[in-house]
Image: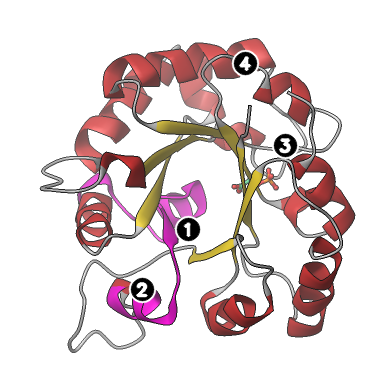
Amino acid sequence: MKKLIVGNWKMNQTLPLAKAFFADLKTVELEHEAWIAPQAFHVTACLQMAPEGIWIGAQNVSNEEHGAFTGENSPFSLRELGGKFVIIGHSERRQLFNETNAQLALKVRKSLSLGLAVIYCVGETLAEREQNKTFEVIKTQLNDGLKDLGDYNPDNLIVAYEPVWAIGTGKVATPAQAQEVHSAIREQLGSKTTLLYGGSVKPDNASELLKQKDIDGALVGGASLKPSDFIALCQAPV
Ligand code: PGA
């Protein structure tokens, strides 16, 4: 069964590295669907360099389309360029840039209304997990961040479960831990929503995670930067 592998490049990759990455991707037929979110300044170049079928998107957008918002990036302009999706509410945006569920709800709503696919990220910190608050935290992030969404195509809403303690730490959630949370999210949102797991996904642990019943794909940081790793993830047996 085809899964969805999304590379979140964060503020990494140079243009020559991105060019080499896509050149390598062009040499293979990928088993799973692959999307890449480069930094905003690289979206146009990546749209030109990516092989056909690989969607390019953004790591964040404004909740406004146009206007006096110096320094913001419009989801309208992303769509105009040919960008197809946006990651919203990554834990780095929540923690480093203080984005709240209420602000994220506005971004999700605006992006969905423009026909962009949205990857809405949720996840608990280590302290919250240790206090047995995982399910409560995620329920609130879903309730408050996916509020008043208006009319949208349900296929465009994707949720990524990324335990904060697993992001960039090498400490991956066990397949059972991930499945447990995914199944609770599925129960809350219904079967339509595509659910990705994120947090230290690597070629050597991807298959076991992707084999879980409620894991439809992966959101990958570190292992999405090197073409050989990313290709291995996109070929992971499931
Ligand atoms: P990681 O990052 O794969 O490097 O842990 C995941 C993410 O931040 O989405």
Q: CA distance from mark 1 to mark 3?
A: 22 Å
Q: Which residue is mark 3?
A: 201
Q: Residue at x 63, y 26 (%)?
A: 1
Q: Amino acid at mark 4?
A: Gln
Answer whether residue 73 is visible to the viewer in this image.
no
Q: Residue at x 36, y 85 (%)?
A: 71
From the viewer's perspective, is 86 left or right of 40? Answer: left
Nearer the observer, disc 2 or disc 3?
A: 2
Q: In what element is the residue under mark 4?
A: loop
Q: What percent of the width, then of the height, locates residue 38?
A: 60, 69
Instruction: Kindly indicate the quadrant of the structure image that contains residue 193.
Output: top left
Q: What percent of the width, then of the height, locates residue 85?
A: 43, 59
Q: CA distance from mark 4 to mark 2?
A: 33 Å
Q: Is mark 4 within 8 Å of ligand 1?
A: no
Q: What percent of the width, then of the height, locates residue 205?
A: 80, 27
Magenta segment includes 104? no
Q: In what element is the residue under mark 3?
A: loop
Q: Which residues are magenta?
A: 76-102
Q: Which residue is mark 1?
A: 96
Q: Amino acid at mark 1?
A: Leu
Image vertical order of residue 63 relative to residue 19, above or below: above
Q: Which residue is mark 4?
A: 212
Q: Residue at x 85, y 49 (%)?
A: 229
- What number is the disc on residue 81? none
Nearer the observer, disc 2 or disc 1?
A: 2
Q: Is mark 2 within 8 Å of ligand 1?
A: no
Nearer the observer, disc 3 or disc 4?
A: 4
Nearer the observer, disc 1 or disc 3?
A: 3
Image vertical order of residue 52 relative to residue 215, above or below: below
Label 1 packing within 10 angstroms: few (<14), some (14-19), many (20+)? few
Q: Which residue is mark 2?
A: 79
Q: Amino acid at mark 2?
A: Arg
